[in-house]
Amino acid sequence: MSSEHAQQHPISLYLKVWGWLFLLSFFSYMVDYMHVQGPLRWTLVLTFMLLKAGLILSVFMHVKWERLALKLLLFVPLFAIVVFVALMAIEGDYTYALRLLYFRQH
């Protein structure tokens, strides 16, 4: 039988993360409650969402304590997908603008 013990994280870490998640959720709720509209609303909502997802992923899913190779395996493909979607959106806007320009002239 092995005498190795699994690493135990202090409960205070989880309580702090829960507190941050509660605070970020409160701010997200306040964006709706204060009737923030337009690009500011979506920027705030997405920022709070990404912060909460990052906290959950890093602490509760234990990615914070994983090796760099596993972190890269998780995040490099995700980053590549985001870059490719952004490039496709830019190309789509360019194509749409060219079609509008072409069909207005003819």
Image (cartoon, grey):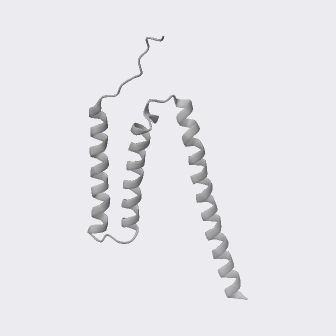
Quadrant of the rendered image containing residue 65: top left
> Which percent across, then down, holds residue 51?
38, 49
> Which percent across, then down, holds residue 78?
57, 47
Residue extending farthest bottom: 106
Identify which residue is drawn at 64% across, 68% down: 92
101 left or right, relative to 28: right
Residue extending farthest front: 1
For the residue pair 44 and 54, the one nearer the viewer reads as 54
Residue 48 in the image: above or below residue 104: above
> Which percent across, then down, holds residue 71?
52, 35
For the residue pair 13 and 97, the one nearer the viewer reads as 13
30 left or right, relative to 106: left
For the residue pair 86 and 48, the one nearer the viewer reads as 48
Viewport quadrant of the C terminus: bottom right
> Which percent across, then down, holds residue 12?
26, 33
Residue 22 in the image: above or below residue 86: above
Residue extending farthest right: 106
23 left or right, relative to 100: left
5 left or right, relative to 82: left
For the residue pair 2 and 83, the one nearer the viewer reads as 2
Identify which residue is drawn at 60% across, 64% down: 89
Identify which residue is drawn at 36% across, 25% down: 8
